[in-house]
Image (tube, helix red, strand yellow):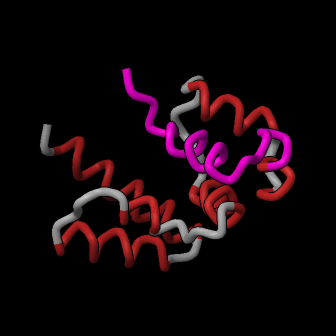
Amino acid sequence: MTNRFDFIRALRNEQNLTIEELAEKANVSVDLISRLERGDRNDISVVRLEKIMNAFNLELGDIFGRSKLDDISDKFVTKFLQMNETNQRQYATIFLEILELNK
């Protein structure tokens, strides 16, 4: 099974950082980084993920640059990432409710 956060370990290894160094740079806990890399945690707030990406000198949107998104998906992700955290939560909740209706 593929871990959705494998890229964190790959980026950390590319930059020769220990888990402790990355956690300090990103101002997040060592436990968070460790659990994400092991696949023991499948969720993370946008704020924390952004901190980790910034520690690699990358933008949060760079995660999506590694995948092929069509224009509509790209526009959706770009607009979503530009929202403040409160609006992200509200829109994510609405979006998830819509997806549940389409089951």
In depth, the one of 18 and 77 nearer the eye is: 18
The residue furthest top is 1
In-image side of 68 versus 35 (left or right): left
In-image side of 63 versus 56 (left or right): left
* Screen quadrant of the C terminus: top left
Residue 52 rendering spot, x and y as whole percentages: 67, 56
Residue 12 position (above or below residue 53)? above
Asked whether residue 80 is drawn in magenta, I would say no
Q: What stretch is highlighted in magenta?
A: 1-21
Residue 90 rendering spot, x and y as whole percentages: 46, 63
In-image side of 29 versus 102 (left or right): right
**Which quadrant of the view contains residue 72?**
bottom left
In depth, the one of 6 and 74 nearer the eye is: 6
Q: How many marks on residues?
A: 0
* Screen quadrant of the N terminus: top left
Residue 84 position (above or below residue 69)? below
Residue at x 65%, y 43% (from the top left corner): 13
Residue 78 rendering spot, x and y as whole percentages: 38, 76
